[in-house]
Amino acid sequence: MIGLLSIAFFSTVSAATIEDADTARVAYSNCLVEFTTAQLDEKVGTGTFKKAAAAACPSERTAMIASIKKDEMEFGSSEDEASSYAKEEADGVLFSFTDGYAGYASSNTRPVKEE
């Protein structure tokens, strides 16, 4: 019985922390949508955008990295591994915008926020 309760508790904790990380990822992504849209509206060049995007949405990026790092450490990763993985994940979100910027600009389309 205790084992079953422990499993249920850890499942609840794991689901909550994963949800926090996903919420933080969506917040960072949506902030980058707003930033990217503003840059597209101003017709900023791709190179300039890539440089500026790296510094965009610092609080959302920091929150995403912290949330993922916390999750990874709870799942047994070392602090260095968790930090590295969390930064890679945030860099992946950023890359999707810097990589897609020229396509948005040439097709006159805009990224869309996640809900």
Image (cartoon, rainbow, N blue to C red):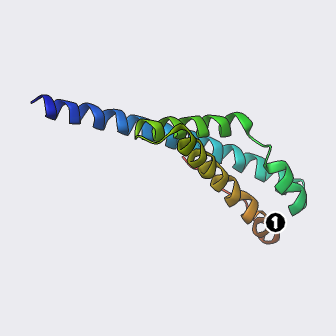
The residue wearing badge 1 is: 105
Residue shown at the point (66%, 36%) measured from the top left: 62
Which of these two is toward me, 37 or 89? 89
Q: Nearer the viewer, residue 48 or 39?
A: 48
Total number of numbered discs in the rendering:
1
Q: Is residue 27 left or right of residue 107?
A: left
Residue 31 quadrant: top right
Q: Is residue 19 visible?
A: no
Q: Residue at x 26, y 31 (%)?
A: 9
Q: Position of residue 33 (x, y in %)?
A: 70, 50
Residue 69 visible in the snapshot:
yes
- Taking the spot 77% from the left edge, 63% from the top edge, the residue there is 101
**In the image, is 60 to the left or to the right of 15?**
right
Q: Which corner quadrant holds the N terminus?
A: top left
Q: Residue furthest left?
A: 1
Q: State left or right for residue 110 relative to residue 84.
A: right
Question: Could you say whether the residue bearing mark 1 is in a helix, strand or loop?
Answer: helix
Q: Decide: few, some or many residues near mark 1? Use Cα within 10 Å; few <14, some 14-19, many ≥20.
A: some
On the image, the x and y values in percent for residue 114 come to: 57, 50
Q: Position of residue 14 (x, y in %)?
A: 36, 38
For the residue marked with disc 1, what is the amino acid?
Ala
